[in-house]
Image: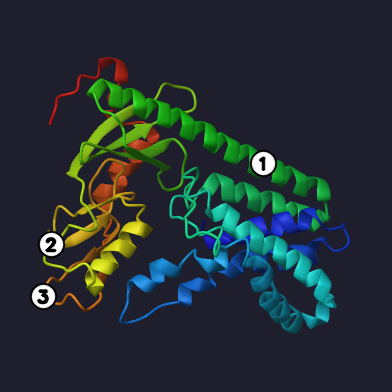
């Protein structure tokens, strides 16, 4: 999630295991430990632009790396905050708690986190919560500030209970939207082969769904308010591509073919040819709007230079029209389809 929430969670969970006297020191160590894994953003290469996405949320976010990474962070905290007179053992314990919380929290989002490296390269992405969720974050800020001011462990426990309750609520919403998408697919006569459902930015009532059937991707937006039945908007229908055969001019052992494989792994194999650029492979998990085919990023292929790494393209270019439509979708002021009245036309 965003750095602010990562620090908050690290501070909150560390404070839970502290006594009242040391709660502020524990929260400081936990907050820094909670932020530290994202230092992997500095792993970059000018020649290989995919190195960044390959190693973000990689080994630094692993549960097995946390005890090692916490040693280095512990030494930095001990050096920088020596006036607080914290022992190395104290700093390490609460830094480790914060460090561990980072990967676990990131695994709840849709980006993908290599939580069990080096035992597995599998990217855990439970797709339960957005990388930015104001309700979750601001509630944690409020509870943590008051708990530190009052040195109250009971408020810390309340913050922990809220965190678990909110994640459980996200899980219930995810299940609701998943069931709804299966009902839509049945109306269409589709057998879902692969499916990803993720909340859109900043909320858990507007979701993006992408499923694959018969070598096509179907993108839908689902509006699932708390006190009403879900509604949806049918979106893009796209041809699926194979990372091994797309751009047949590229040999199997070429650098760009390997880059396509790397990007496909990062995108959980939800890759497609971007509608505005026939040489651009996009990540269909993310779009400008919940139902569209405009990926937020992608890789540009140049078949004339197969031994030079692909270019990573940041495609985010939001405008006022986008914000207006997104807000209308999120607020429910939008012409959604109701499942009972839905008649699918095969395309």
* CA neighbours of label 1 inside 10 A, class few (<14), some (14 to 19), many (20+): some
Report x, y in % for residue 174: 47, 35
Pointer 1: what residue?
Answer: 162
The numbered disc on residue 134 is none
Residue 103 seen in the current view? yes
Q: Position of residue 133 (x, y in %)?
A: 51, 48
**Residue 286, percent from left and from top:** 33, 50
Residue 8 can be seen, yes or no? no
Q: Tell me the mark number nearer the camera, choosing from 1 and 2.
A: 2
Q: How many marks?
A: 3
* Residue that lies at the very extreme toward the bottom in this rendered image: 79
Determine the secondary structure under disc 1.
helix
Residue at the disc numbered 2: 248
Q: Residue at x 43, y 42 (%)?
A: 199
Q: Nearer the viewer, residue 276 or 184?
A: 184
**Residue 43, image quadrant:** bottom left
Q: How is the image coloured?
A: rainbow
Alpha-carbon span between mark 3 and mark 1:
54 Å
Position of residue 257 in the picture relative to residue 24 (left or right)? left
Q: Distance between the Cα atoms at labels 1 and 2?
A: 52 Å
Residue at image coords 30%, 81%: 47
The tag earlier along the polypeptide, 2 or 3, is: 2
Q: Is residue 323 left or right of residue 249?
A: right
Give me the C-alpha separation between circle 2 and circle 3: 12 Å
- Looking at the rendering, in which quadrant would you find the C terminus? top left
Please identify the quarter of the rendering in which residue 213 is found.
top left
Q: Residue at x 16, y 68 (%)?
A: 250
Q: Which residue is mark 3?
A: 304
Q: Nearer the viewer, mark 3 or mark 1?
A: 3
């Amino acid at each position: 999630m965003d750095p602010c929430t990562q620090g908050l969670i690290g501070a909150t969970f560390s404070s839970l295991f502290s006594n009242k006297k040391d709660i502020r020191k524990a929260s400081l160590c936990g907050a820094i430990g909670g932020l530290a894994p994202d230092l992997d953003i500095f792993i970059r290469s000018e020649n290989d632009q995919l190195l960044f996405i390959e190693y973000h949320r990689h080994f630094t976010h692993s549960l097995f790396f946390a005890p090692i990474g916490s040693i280095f962070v512990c030494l930095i905290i001990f050096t920088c905050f020596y006036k607080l007179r914290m022992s190395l053992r104290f700093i390490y314990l609460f830094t480790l708690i914060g460090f561990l919380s980072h990967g676990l929290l990131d695994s709840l989002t849709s980006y993908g986190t290599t939580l069990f490296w080096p035992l597995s390269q599998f990217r855990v992405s439970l797709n339960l919560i957005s990388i930015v969720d104001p309700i979750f974050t601001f509630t944690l800020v409020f509870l943590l500030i008051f708990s530190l001011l009052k040195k109250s462990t009971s408020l810390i426990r309340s913050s922990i209970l809220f965190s678990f309750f909110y994640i459980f609520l996200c899980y219930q919403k995810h299940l609701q939207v998943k069931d709804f998408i299966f009902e839509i697919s049945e109306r269409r006569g589709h057998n879902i082969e692969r499916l990803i459902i993720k909340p859109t930015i900043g909320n858990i009532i507007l979701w993006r769904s992408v499923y694959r059937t018969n070598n096509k991707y179907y993108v839908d937006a689902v509006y699932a308010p708390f006190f009403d039945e879900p509604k949806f908007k049918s979106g893009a229908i796209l041809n699926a591509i194979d990372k091994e055969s797309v751009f047949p001019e590229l040999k199997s052992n070429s650098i760009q073919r390997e880059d396509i494989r790397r990007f496909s792994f990062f995108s959980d194999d939800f890759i497609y040819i971007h509608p505005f650029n026939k040489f651009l492979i996009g990540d269909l998990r993310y779009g400008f709007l919940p139902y569209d085919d405009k990926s937020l990023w992608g890789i540009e292929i140049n078949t004339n230079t197969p031994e030079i790494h692909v270019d990573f393209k940041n495609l985010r270019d939001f405008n006022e029209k986008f914000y207006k439509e997104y807000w209308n979708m999120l607020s429910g002021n939008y012409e959604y389809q109701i499942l009972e009245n839905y008649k699918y036309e095969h395309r």
